[in-house]
Structure formats: structure tokens, C-alpha cells
């Protein structure tokens, strides 16, 4: 068991939380509180890593004492190119947000979107407006069984290619762009996985609105939710569920 001074012994399992501003996030602190309460000899270490140093840092985990790492949203697509093996959903979506060291190889997987889908189910959310076609959008689409999803993007051709790539037959596709008037009030939730810098075209939001942005990243969805007095839920708002999911994976 980790002692009260949180000292690291030779038996302590070390994990990293890798991000540009990892030290600002409460991810490590919440994780360590969880391990300590359960008497689990492990420690999550925040690792502030610049983009230029990401490859070197992750690649060198293969010969380090670090057993794995959680990856902050800004680096999830870059890390997929560094790991030796990746799960099927990680490969197909183009991202991984958790890695484990197996001997001198690194294995990548996705956990955050699984957590998001469970949160949505617990909230009894059924109808979802999904904005964007990035790796998070792909991962969610693969895990969206049980939801009614409508897809939105500023470029319809790219959106059609996205749905064809994911084999989403008869998908409800819609355009969202500056100058339009968009009403999301008929949906239970909005998920913004786009790179849109403004959502001023949205006149009405759903009651609940999610993205995977941390507090250091600008969120146009958060800005619009404040303006329209609707609930906004970020990556950091889901930390309790996210850290528990990581702990479950570590223990298993």
C-alpha cells in the first residue's frame, strides 16, 4: 500500500498523464486519491510535454519504468503513430488516448469515448447531434449503438465520405456553417468534435452539450452554451468517470 507520504517504492506502478498542460489538469490528483483510497500501490504522474518532445517521450517509455500513460486530447492522433500495436477501434478512428507498456512494446487503445457513451446512457440521452468528422467523431460513431445520431459538418462532401468510410447507411447528414440558422433544441445532446471556431449559427442548443476540450483549450461550444444558458460538459467535467475507467483498466 502507498504510504501517507505518497512515496514511490520499487513496487509502485507508475503511469503518466501526458499533455501540453498536464500539470494544470486534476487528472493525476484525482487518480492518485483513488489509488490511495483503495490501497493500490500506483501513482499517476503529470507530464507536461511539448509537441516537439512527444515522440521522444512516448517512444522512450518502452525502456522506462512507466507502465503506461493517459493522453490528453491534443495528442491523441499523434500518439497512434508511435505505439507498436493498437486496438481495432483505435486504428479505425485514428486515435488512442491510453497506452500500456508490454515488455518493450507499447499498445494503444481508446477509453474516453467509451466513458462518454456510458455517461450519455446513464443520462438517458437518445437523440444526438454530432458536429464534426475528426477522430473523436469516428470513435463515437463506432460506439453509438442505441443512439439516434444526426451528423453535421461544414463540408457536406467530406461528411458524406465520412459516413461512407464508417459504413453508416442512410445516415442523417446536415450542413452547419456561418450564416445559417441551426436549431438543436429537438436533440437530447450535442457533441462537438469539429474544428469550427464559432457556433454563432446555432440559435438553439440541446439541454446538454459535450466536447472533449480541457480547460486550456478554447471551446466554441462552451461559449455558445453560456450565451444560450444551456449545460456544457467538458473533458474536465468528466474526470471522476474518466479516472475510474483508467483505474479499472490498470487493475485488469
Image (cartoon, grey):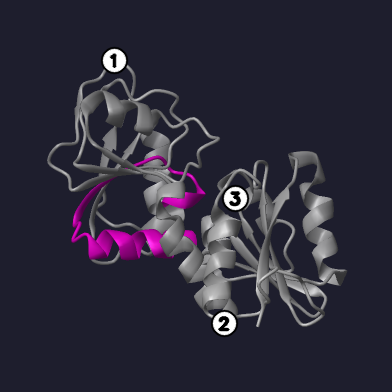
Q: Residue at x 37, y 57 (%)?
A: 141
Q: Which residues are magenta?
A: 112-137
Q: Where residue 208 sits in the image (x, y, percent)?
A: 24, 44
Number of the front mark, 1 or 2: 2
Q: Residue at x 55, y 35 (%)?
A: 216
Taking the image as shown, residue 197 lies to the left or right of residue 247, namely left
Label 1: how many Cα within 10 Å (few below 14, some 14–19, many 20+): few
Tell me which corner region of the image, top left, top right, bottom left or bottom right, holds residue 181: top left
Q: Residue at x 48, y 41 (%)?
A: 213
Label 3: how many Cα within 10 Å (few below 14, some 14–19, many 20+): many
C-alpha gap between disc 2 and disc 3:
21 Å
- Most foreground residue, 122 or 36: 36
Find disc 3 in the rendering and name its residue: 72
Considering only vertical position in the picture, is 222 above or below 162?
above
Considering only vertical position in the picture, is 102 above or below 130?
below
Q: Where residue 19 sits in the image (x, y, percent)?
A: 66, 47
Find disc 1 in the rendering and name its residue: 179
Find disc 2 in the rendering and name its residue: 251
- Most foreground residue, 151 or 64: 64
Quarter of the image that includes the C terminus: bottom right
Amino acid at each position: 500500500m502507498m504510504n501517507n507520504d505518497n512515496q514511490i517504492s520499487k513496487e509502485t506502478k507508475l503511469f503518466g498523464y501526458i499533455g501540453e498542460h498536464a500539470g494544470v489538469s486534476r487528472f493525476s490528483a484525482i487518480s492518485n486519491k483513488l489509488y490511495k483510497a483503495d490501497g493500490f500501490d500506483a501513482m499517476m504522474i503529470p507530464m507536461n510535454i511539448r509537441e516537439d518532445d512527444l515522440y521522444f517521450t512516448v517512444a522512450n517509455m518502452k525502456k522506462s519504468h512507466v507502465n503506461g500513460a493517459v493522453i490528453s486530447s491534443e495528442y491523441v492522433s499523434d500518439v497512434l503513430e508511435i505505439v507498436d500495436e493498437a486496438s481495432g477501434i483505435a486504428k479505425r478512428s485514428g486515435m488512442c488516448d491510453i497506452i500500456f507498456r508490454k515488455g518493450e512494446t507499447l499498445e494503444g487503445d481508446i477509453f474516453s469515448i467509451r466513458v462518454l457513451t456510458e455517461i450519455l446512457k446513464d443520462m438517458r440521452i437518445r437523440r444526438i447531434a454530432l458536429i464534426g468528422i475528426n477522430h473523436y467523431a469516428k470513435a463515437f460513431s463506432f460506439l453509438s449503438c442505441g443512439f439516434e445520431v444526426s451528423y453535421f459538418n461544414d463540408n457536406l462532401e467530406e461528411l458524406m465520405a465520412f459516413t461512407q468510410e464508417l459504413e453508416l447507411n442512410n445516415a442523417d447528414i446536415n450542413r452547419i456553417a456561418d450564416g445559417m440558422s441551426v436549431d438543436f433544441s429537438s436533440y437530447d445532446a450535442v457533441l462537438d468534435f469539429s474544428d469550427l471556431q464559432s457556433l454563432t449559427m446555432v440559435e438553439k442548443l440541446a439541454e446538454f452539450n459535450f466536447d472533449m476540450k480541457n480547460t486550456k483549450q478554447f471551446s466554441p461550444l462552451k461559449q455558445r452554451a453560456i450565451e444560450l444558458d444551456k449545460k456544457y460538459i467538458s473533458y474536465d467535467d468528466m474526470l471522476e468517470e474518466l479516472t475510474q475507467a483508467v483505474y479499472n483498466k490498470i487493475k485488469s
